[in-house]
């Protein structure tokens, strides 16, 4: 079982309750896979507290999501009762219990909280559920330039767990860090063609001593 129960605990504790769409995701969807322009049937991996849902409802997309925390799924469905049956509590690295084809699958910082083999398995499932020409957008996939890359305990060559209290990853279970070759290898290994890959680094200047955040954003297509 690759999915860790840590996220359910974090949500039950009232943390990580983001409700505004993530700006990089908004930009990517508008630039590369907009509903109304051929990307109408959409699946989110790990919707969390539902931050990205208003964007897709506003665009008129047919939105579905898989999320491993039953607590947050129940809460999101109370906010969006019209998505009953469209948001399912499950481990998306083991199964995607929707029949395809989807036009767009996206993931903002969700699959990247899993070990290498589970990520590879999920990417195969995503590839299978996309239509030819469909896209997989990833936002905020952690990079090996992140200052937390060596913290906690090693799970596999790219995954850490039990990251220390006080940091951004405290209590979040597995955290996966990708260098460029590893990320491209994961995506191409599932059959995707990488169409865009961008690296972002935040190096806080003031106050000094805060962590460097480094992430990848990408668009991958099913040929
Ligand atoms: C950092 S949160 C991101 C939530 C949301 N995508 C957002 O942008 O606000 C990561 C989410 O991924 C979910 N998650 C991680 N691994 C999962 C898995 N294997 N199966 C289902 N959900 C998973 C967690 O439960 C959590 O809600």
Image (cartoon, grey):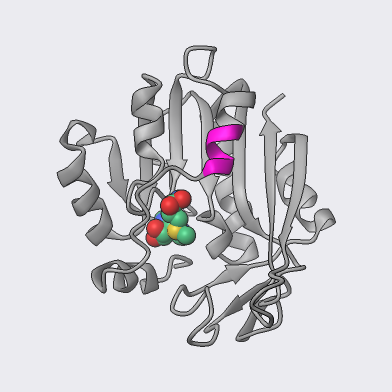
Left or right, residue 201 beside residue 67? right
Residue 15 in the image: above or below residue 220: below
| Label tally | 0
Could you tell me if residue 75 is visible in this image? yes
**Residue 156 picture location, percent across and down:** 67, 75
Tell me the residue at 29%/45% (across/down).
88
The residue segment tinted magenta is: 23-27
**75 shown above or below 36:** below
Q: Is residue 24 magenta?
A: yes
Where is residue 199 shown, x and y percent of the image?
A: 76, 51
In the rendered image, the residue lying farthest to the right is 181
Seen from this angle, which residue lies furthest front?
206
**Quarter of the image with the N terminus in it:** bottom left
Residue 34 lies, with reference to residue 193, above or below; the image says above
The reply to whether the magenta stretch includes residue 110 is: no
Residue at the location (26% across, 57% down)? 72
Residue that protrudes farthest toward the top in the picture: 37
Could you tell me residue 160's position as x and y percent? 62, 77
Closer to us: 29 or 184 = 29
What residue is rendered at 76% in x and 36% in y?
Answer: 196
Viewport quadrant of the C terminus? top right
Q: What secondary structure is the stretch in magenta mostly built from? A: helix
* Relative horizontal placement of residue 92, taking residue 211 as reference (left or right): left
Q: Quadrant of residue 203?
A: bottom right
Q: Nearer the viewer, residue 143 or 133?
A: 143
From the viewer's perspective, tell me whether residue 158 is left or right of residue 77.
Answer: right
Residue 98 seen in this snapshot: no
- Residue 52, quarter of picture: top left
Across and down, in percent, residue 50 comes to 34, 46
Viewer-closest of 181 and 151: 151
What residue sits 43% from the left and 23% below the top? 41
The image quadrant where one finds ligand 1 is bottom left
């Amino acid at each position: 079982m690759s999915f860790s129960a840590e996220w359910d605990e974090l949500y039950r504790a009232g943390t990580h309750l983001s409700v505004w769409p993530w700006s990089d995701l908004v930009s990517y969807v508008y630039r590369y896979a907009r509903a109304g322009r051929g990307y109408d049937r959409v699946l989110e991996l790990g919707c969390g507290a539902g931050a990205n849902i208003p964007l897709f409802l506003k665009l008129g997309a047919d939105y579905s999501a898989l999320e491993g925390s039953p607590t947050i799924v129940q809460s999101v469905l109370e906010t969006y009762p019209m998505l009953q049956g469209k948001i399912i509590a499950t481990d998306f690295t083991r199964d995607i219990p929707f029949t395809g084809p989807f036009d767009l699958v996206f993931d903002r910082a969700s699959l990247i909280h899993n070990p290498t083999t589970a990520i590879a398995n999920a990417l195969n499932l995503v590839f299978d559920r996309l239509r030819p020409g469909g896209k997989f957008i990833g936002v905020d996939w952690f990079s090996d330039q992140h200052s937390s890359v060596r913290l906690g305990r090693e799970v596999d060559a790219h995954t850490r767990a039990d990251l220390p209290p006080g940091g951004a990853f405290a209590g979040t279970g597995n955290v996966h860090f990708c260098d460029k070759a590893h990320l491209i290898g994961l995506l191409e290994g599932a059959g995707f063609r990488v169409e865009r890959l961008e690296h972002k680094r935040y190096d806080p200047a003031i106050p000094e001593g805060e962590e460097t955040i480094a992430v990848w954003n990408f668009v991958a297509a099913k040929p």
